[in-house]
Every structure is written in C-alpha cells, then in structure tokens.
Amino acid sequence: MEKRTSSLRHLTAAAAALLAVALLSGSSLRAKAAESAGVKTALIQGGNVVVATQGSASSSDGLYHLYAQEVYQSGTQGTEIAQAPAAAGAAFAFPLNKNTADSNLFRKFQLVVLQNGVPTAVGNAKFITNPESAATHTAKRHDAGKKGLLPAAALLHGNQLNALGIRQITYNLPIGNLCNGSGVSYTYNGKTYHFSQAICGQYDFLVPQMNKQGIQVSLIILNNLTADPTLIHPLSRDFAGANYYAFNTAEPAAVEKLEAIASFLGSRYSGAHGTVDNWIIGNEVNARQEWNYMTPGAGMTVAACEYEKALRIFYNGIRSENANARIYTSIDYEWNGSDNVAAHYAGRPFLDAILTFGVMGGNYDWNLAIHPYNAPLTDPIAWVQKYAPRTADARFDTMYNINVVTDYLCTPLYKNTKGQVRYIKCSEQGYTSTGGEQLQAASVIYAYRQAMANRYIDGFILARELDDAGEIAQGLATGLLNVDLTPKMAYTWYANADSANVAAAASAIIGVPDLNSLLVKR
C-alpha cells in the first residue's frame, strides 16, 4: 500500500512540476514549452525511428545517450537505446519494431548526458509524431457533409438516417465492455488479448451498415468501470458512481492494454469490418466528476496530463493502422468557467493544458469535438444566448457563439503541425421541445445553418434521434422523435435543413426577414 501511495504522490508532484513550466497563457505557451537543447523530433522513416536533437549539452564522457521511455516514465528512467558523439545536431536511428515485444511506436525518447558522472536528462522527451508512416491501411474517408445525428440503437435497422439526409453519426464504444468477454483474439507486441465477440459484433454490423449508406462514423471511446479495474487510473479508483473514468496511463499492464486496444480498433475498422473515420477519445473530459472521473485532490494539471497521455496512445495506435483516421479530444460547453469547480474544469484552460503537454512531448494533429448546447440546457432558443456572448471571455460556448472557439483555434498557437486549423466537430448538441415544437425546429435549423456558415466546423451532430424518458423528466426533450416514435416538426425540418422554404419558415418563427442575417460567418 505504501509503495502505491508513494508512486501516486510522485505522479502528482511530477505533473505539478510540468505545470510550472508549461501552463502558460497566450502566444508564449509554445515558446516556453520548447527547449533550447534536447530531442527535437522523433520520426518514422521507413522501418526506423530517426531522432534528431537540437542545441548542445556538455557531457563528461563525450556522448549523448538516448533513452527510450514508456508513457509513465520520466527523468532518466527507461532504457538506453542508442549513443552518439555529443555535438550539436546529433541524430540517432534505430528500428521501429512495430508490433513486436521491442516496439518503439508508443515510446518517448529522452536525451541524457553524464554530468560529473551522474545521468542527467536534457530537455523534454519526445514521442513519435508521424505514426501514420507505419500504417498498413489508408482507408478512404466518407467526408460527404456536416449533417449528423447520434442514432437510437433501436432504430438502426430502419431507413430513418437516409430519410433525414444524415451524413455523419457518432456512437459510443465503452472499452470496459469490449474487454469484458472473449471470442475475438488479437496478438500485439507479442501478447494476446481477448475481446468480446458480442461487442465486436455490434460494431461489425454498425460500421459497414453506415458506410454502405455513405454515412461517416465517429466512435467515442469511453472508459467504463467493470469487474476488472485494470484500465481505470489508480487516481480514479476511490469512487464507483461515475459514468466514465480516466484512462490508466500510470501502470505498465494498463498502458500495454490501451496500446493494444488502440491498434486493434484502428486495424479492425479500416477495411474488412467497415471504416471508422473519426475517433473521439473520451466524453467531455474536462467534466471530471461525471465523464472522466479522477479524484478531486489530483487537480486539473494531473487530470489533463494523464488524459493527454491517453490521447497520444490512441493517436499513435489508431493512426499507425489507418493513416486517414482523425483523432479528437472532447470538451463540454463550459468554456471559460465552471458552474462547479470541484466537479468540472473549464474547457478552455483544460484544452490549453492538453495542447501544452502535447507540444512538450512533440506536437501532433489531434482535433476537437465540442458540445455547444444552449446555456442553460433547458433553454429552447438557440439564436439568443444571454450567458454566451460572442466575446473571448464568454463563460459558455453554444452554437450562438461557436465562433469564439473556432477563432481561438485559428490562432497560430493552436495550429497543427502542418500550420492548419485543427478540425472542430460540434459532436453533441440538441434543443428541447418542451417550449414547443416550433421553437425546437427553429433552433435546430439556426444551429445547423450556423455550423454550415463556419468553414472550420467539420460536423454538426444532434444528440438525440429519439426522446429519452429520463431526460424528459429533467425538462429535456431533445429528440427529433417522440418516445412513441412519432416525428416532431424538427424531424421534418432537419430532413430538409438546406431548403430555402425551411430557412424561410425558421426566419418567420425567429422574427427576422433572413436567417442568414443572424449567422456569424467564418
């Protein structure tokens, strides 16, 4: 028990130390996170990893020592993998060894020098940032439009999605369920893992079914609690009442399993069993209490640090199998503030922390899935949002002020490795019909048209196809269908969301001559 407690204290202290260096505001963040000496890049070239250094550091033995580290290691932990003469611009090359016991795909690489005979880490360790170079698949994407929906499982066998003109869906994939069973074996890095045939069968049906209809699939990877706590972070095991939990990036067996899961999913759903184009890692990960549970004493820095490690694992694992897959992080609509700081971290600083830790370990091309609901959730009107002004300091992000988020990600600080704006998916939002079906229908059309007017948004996913009785009790009837499957006005309007007649009808309800006059174009 003492050993585990000590290791958790070390984890918390290490993340706090990183925060002192990394969590900076404004345009200085990347500059401060960068180092003057150490590893510059780690890239796959052919079957090798090539690690380039920058700057110079004195070494008492005249050598640079390169250590390979697992995601949970730091400082001078790890295994020496290569040496080179201590000189500016030194480089190392060694085998990638993908899918072997000696694989370097998920490792980070730390420059170490001897100073007075003591091994000393120089700069930040860097991960491989181009895992797609090792991919065995380059599956064609299904980028056919922004209109999306989270479909009701009971209605998947029908023709509802085609009738609505849906081009994208999101769907949950709890990995605890995936690992809670057998029937599908997968050998990775020399170890064999067993996954549930029943769970795989669900997605083996869903994904090709959507692909055949020209519908893009985004799967949401969720870490649910089962009888086996391996995948639950050690700082998340003090509470059993959360919906989902922080991924375990702190213990060797769990990290190996996450790497295998990421590779398995990337491989399985990039061809023979259909293609998943997008993978969303976690749900509203800044909402610590409900959706990404970690003990409150850990704090935001540790939560973001550990989550970013999981994001990187899934990024490298999935993209090393399917080069065309996109990986997204997920935050809720509390942008600059939280209604309960003990339970929810504000989205923007949490995203800043993800970016910072990502840059420190080697910048990579993750994307953003955000949930711009109305504030409050029970407000039926999307085109007027009292608590979500179109200003940089807005507490909430809704479809009314979604430009606040897209403008923020357009800053040079947030550009990806190619100098492009990261993809931004409005992956969950909905509007209640409790204020009347007309207001719901008009809100759906306004929000959809706002997404279409913003070129940085790559998807607009309504949260419910079918009303949920539990949510109705909370004043939320956000489905396009009533519980008895009868369609609401919003159903018909969403099916024809691009038509001039529907735009005119929405304008009439809103009380403006032209709906376009309300939209912020980007």
Image (cartoon, rainbow, N blue to C red):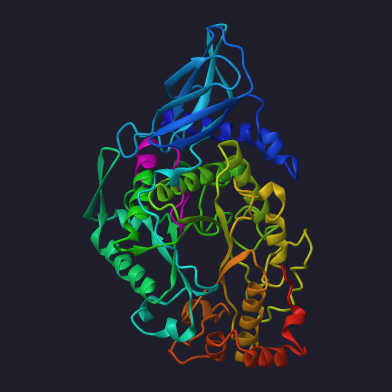
Compared across the picture, whether 155 is left or right of 24 comes to: left
Compared with 195, 384 (above or below) is: below
Quadrant, the N terminus: top left
Q: Residue at x 37, y 81 (%)?
A: 155
Compared with 34, 245 (above or below) is: below
Compared across the picture, whether 165 is left or right of 198 comes to: right
- Foreground residue among 257 and 273: 273
Quadrant, the C terminus: bottom right
Does residue 1 show up magenta in the picture? no
Q: Residue at x 42, y 38 (%)?
A: 106
Horizontal and vertical percent position of residue 98:
34, 38
Compared with 441, 327 (above or below) is: above
Q: Residue at x 33, y 69 (%)?
A: 208
Report the magenta residues as a range: 239-257
Decide if residue 300 is in sight here: no
Residue 13: which quarter of the image?
top right
Q: Magenta region's main secondary structure? A: loop
Decide if residue 99 is in sight here: yes
- Foreground residue among 193 and 160: 160
Q: Residue at x 38, y 85 (%)?
A: 159
Compared with 349, 113 (above or below) is: above
Compared across the picture, whether 181 is left or right of 436 comes to: left
